[in-house]
Image (cartoon, rainbow, N blue to C red):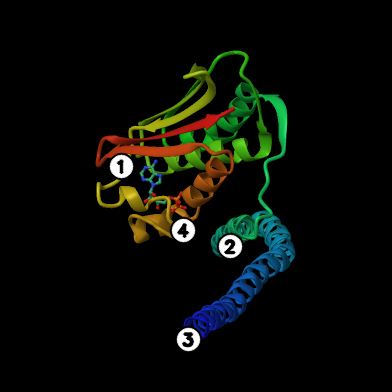
Amino acid sequence: LLVGMVLLFFILALWLSHLMSRKAIIPIARAYARQREFVADASHELRTPMSVMLTSIEALQLEASIDNDPFSKNVLKGMKDEVNSITKLVQELLHLARSDSGEFVLNRSSFNLRDAAVSVVNKLQPLAQAKDIVLRLHAPDELTVNWDAEKLTQLLVLLIDNAVKYTPEKGLVTVLLEDGMEKGAHILTIEVKDSGIGIAAEALPRVFDRFYRQDKSRTRQTGGHGLGLAIAKNIVDAGRGTIHVDSMVGEGSSFKVRIPL
Ligand code: ADP
């Protein structure tokens, strides 16, 4: 009887502790979900006023250029840059909030990655040319992949845009695309190499963290929020891939992505 009572007491204590831990976890989980929902809703609501503001600024810019008013032109350019920066931040937050709440799924379809990369490179070419940077793409003519075209394009934009941003004048940015077989698996490799400022060894493990910026003042000038690489990692993780960075300060950086196809 005594053994039975001790056992019963034990089971009761276990059940109570389980109940209490569940009680503590459920409200935390709910609060966390509510917070994610709030970020997603707030980001969504901010998008419309931002685009209205941008249109208004552009209308004023047109007027200022007709009136040839340098002061207004200058002020409006500053305003436009800030609105663009906030719009980018809102989009990035929305992306991360969606992926946190599990809404992030890959929409696979068959497409030629080379064509997508050519259009990304062409889009970023003016940015590179403004700094006299040579931006090159090496890829096979036909590179058909079955993956999420939009997200893979976004990944390329994030990596190439960073490479150009963090490379001083007259530098070199190379994009390499390859697909091959490794141990019986089909692997897509994307490498974005630059001859830029590089990343300090102690900063390397942190560059994929949210809001991490190596040099806050410099990044302020380049208009980033420290979310680009967190998003890049998110995209790669969604396809069970890996992203790795090698870098030397003053020599350049190389971001290598491997995605199983
Ligand atoms: P940001 O919007 O600040 O560029 P990212 O998440 O894309 O944010 O990058 C995080 C930080 O990693 C950057 O602020 C920068 O310090 C560093 N970084 C990223 N890419 C490069 C690169 N190609 N060369 C040097 N530093 C880089």
Residue topped by disc 3: 2
Residue topped by disc 2: 86
Mark-to-mark CA distance, 4 and 3 = 57 Å
Mark 4 or mark 3: name the one nearer the start of the chain.
3
Amino acid type of the residue tagged 4 in the rendering: Arg
Q: Out of 58 and 21, give the one closest to the viewer.
A: 21
The x and y percentages for residue 260 are 55, 29
Mark 3 or mark 2: name the one nearer the start of the chain.
3
Q: Is mark 1 within 8 Å of ligand 1?
A: yes
Mark count: 4
**Secondary structure under the numbered disc 2 in the rendered image:** helix
Q: Which mark is residue 197?
A: 1
Mark-to-mark CA distance, 1 and 4 = 21 Å
Q: Out of 27 and 239, give the one closest to the viewer.
A: 27
Amino acid type of the residue tagged 3 in the rendering: Leu
Q: Residues within 10 Å of mark 1 (few under 14, many from 20)?
A: some
Q: Which mark is residue 210?
A: 4
The x and y percentages for residue 78 are 54, 62
Mark-to-mark CA distance, 3 and 2 = 69 Å
Give the image quarter of residue 154. Answer: top right
Amino acid type of the residue tagged 1 in the rendering: Ile
Q: Nearer the viewer, mark 3 or mark 2?
A: 3
**Secondary structure under the numbered disc 3 in the rendered image:** helix
Q: Nearer the viewer, mark 4 or mark 3?
A: 3
**Secondary structure under the numbered disc 1 in the rendered image:** loop
Mark-to-mark CA distance, 1 and 2 = 26 Å
Q: Is mark 2 within 8 Å of ligand 1?
A: no
